[in-house]
Amino acid sequence: MDALDVARWQFGVTTVYHFLFVPLTIGLGPLVATLQTLWHRTGNPRYLRLTHFYGKLFLINFAMGVVTGIVQEFQFGMNWSDYSRFVGDVFGAPLAMEALLAFFLESTFLGLWIFGWEKLPKRIHLATIWTAALGSVLSMFFILAANSWMQNPVGFKMNPDTGRPELTDIWAVLTNKVALITFPHTLFAAFVVAGSLLVAVSLWHMVRRPDADSSEHRFALKLGAWVTMVASAGLVFTGDIQGKIMTEVQPMKMAAAEALYHSEQPASFSVLTIGTLDGSREVFTIKLPYLLSFLATGNPKGAVEGINDLQARYAAEYGPGSYSPIVPVTYWSFRVMITLGLAAAAIALLVLWSQRRGRTPSNRWLLRAGLILPLLPLGASTAGWIFTEMGRQPWIVFGELLTRNGVSRSVSLAEVLTSFLAFTLIYAVLAVIEGKLLFRYARAGLPPPKPVRDEASDEADDVPALAY
């Protein structure tokens, strides 16, 4: 073990932990805004109660996401200074847009939403939550644009004097084909997570407390289940396109995802492959003919390059070395992602079926499945990001910078290990706090409607918008 290994583990743990909060924030924001819009248009107090209820869960999760995200960015300078110097001229633009435009838009209007109840006119207050939700989505887009540049570098030229890429076309970075498909795919995943939370919380209250707020929870249950189902369909559609683009720009990642060691035409999809412990060759495999060719190229008889052939090509192009990722990690993370995603969609479908013709769900097994439902898309998202980042290895910027060349050379193993253990311990404590807060407020049930002033009193009200 050396500093590079621990730095990679630390960044991986930090990223995975941070991303547990991101999809719920991104997906729950528009759903809370939708509930408030329904209250604004209909005046039905049940939508207001649901807005307050899920808005509180949204705020708890948002606060945790901000804290962990800040620490994640600090690591660029702490453990990956050579990487930061290399990509700084390119990354500066999208990350500045994320911080100065998206994050400030998100945080400012979220503050107005929090403190604007009974202070702002109803339409303006409604606009604040929609603007905050838009800020979250924009923030995600700019970060994904930066990450997609690592997967498929575009819009730059290499400075021969400094050996660093310099940005020449910000529009090319923002319209990177990888970013344009990763963005909707990640957005659909966020809606699956948020919809699953609505299902889990509402189902628990309907089964455990059938006489309390049944109308509100029934509506939230249907909304969450439909959002989960529709977003799952969107995930399948965008994932198919994403696979074809991945084959085009990172063929080694597709080959590793399928444990395809030798090029095939047509190529078969691996249902199950058992290989050697080092992932160098397959021992046993079950395959579906033609399917991989269709998924990778859109042609059932298309050619798909294998790991061994790509390794030989990359060694000739970039020099001696190993250019294949850890095959067991990419292979199984890809399948965990798909399996958990399909399981979440299946449970959402069962929930919808259990409500047919006005029935109330009462099956205890369905309740148990509903309670674990939010964990499934979170696990799928985590596995998807592990696949995305591990499948790019050994590159930190594909074709331009190896991961081992991006680590800070002045940081010792002891220093990285100390910060790794300290932050991991802090994250464990924060996870307990987050879990307790979410469970406490979710189990408490819907609050009574808060009094909100009428539009007629907007101009006459002399109460300050903010008081200290």
Image: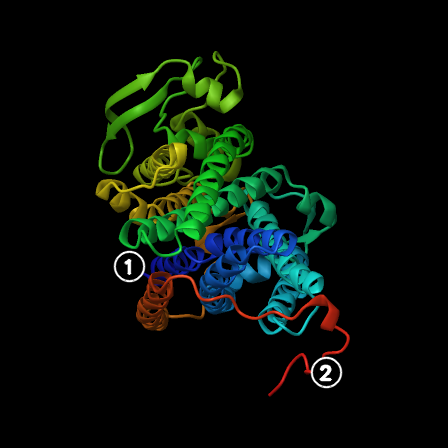
Picture quadrant of residue 457: bottom right
Percent x, y for residue 78?
A: 47, 69
**397 left or right, relative to 440:** right
Instruction: Identify the mark nearer the N-term, 1 or 2.
Output: 1
Which residue is disc 2 drawn over? Answer: 462
The residue at the point 34 percent across, 39 percent down is 340
Residue type for callout 2: Asp
Residue type for callout 1: Met
Q: Residues within 10 Å of mark 1 (few under 14, many from 20)?
A: few
Percent x, y for residue 380?
A: 38, 43
Q: Is residue 94 visible?
A: yes
Picture quadrant of residue 283: top left
SS of the residue under disc 2: loop
Marking on residue 1: 1
**45 left or right, relative to 277:** right
In-front residue for pair 358/338: 358
Q: Is residue 398 above or below residue 167?
A: above
Q: Nearer the viewer, mark 1 or mark 2?
A: 2
Percent x, y for residue 140?
A: 57, 53
